[in-house]
Amino acid sequence: MTDPIQNRFASLVRRAAPAERDPLFRLRVLERREKERFRQRSLAMLGLFVALIAAAVAILALRPVKLDAAGLVLFGGFLASTALLYAPALLPQLRLSRL
């Protein structure tokens, strides 16, 4: 059997121990993961933009006099990819920056 001093010491140690599940740590991990996903999406979008710009430059180099339907399709693809892929990732960041 243990004496009351040991019981009191054990209860104080248990009380001072950190929580079994630290919600703040969990939030930090989730935040870090989400930032990494955002960075990966941003890099993927950068690669897509570079590819679209390179294709547009190649089309203009082949036909510098006029911008035909292929150039318009590439420009439309550039605008559509911006709206569909980058805007959903950017809008939450813009909302958070207002707070």
Image (cartoon, grey):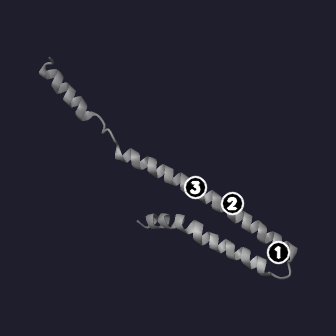
Question: Which of marks 3 and 1 precedes in the sequence?
Answer: 3
Question: Residue under circle 1?
Answer: 60
- Locate residue 14: give its quadrant: top left
What numbered label is drawn on residue 32? none
Residue farthest toward the top in the current orientation of the protein: 1
Question: Residue under circle 3?
Answer: 39
What's the residue type where badge 2 is placed?
Gly
Q: What residue appears at the point 32 percent right and 38 percent down from the top-left corner? A: 20
Q: Can you say which quadrant of the picture contains the N terminus?
A: top left
Q: In this view, does 68 lie above or below 11?
A: below
Question: Residue under circle 2?
Answer: 47
Q: In this view, does 8 lie to the left or right of 54?
A: left
Q: In what element is the residue under mark 2?
A: helix
Q: Position of residue 57 (x, y in %)?
A: 80, 70
Q: Position of residue 47 (x, y in %)?
A: 69, 60
Question: Which of marks 2 and 3 precedes in the sequence?
Answer: 3
Q: In this view, does 44 lie above or below 52?
A: above
Count residues near mark 3 (Cα–Cα under 10 Å), then give few for <14, some for 14-19, many for 20+.
Answer: few
Q: What residue appears at the point 35 percent right and 43 percent down from the top-left corner? A: 22
Q: Position of residue 76 (x, y in %)?
A: 68, 76
Q: In what element is the residue under mark 1?
A: helix
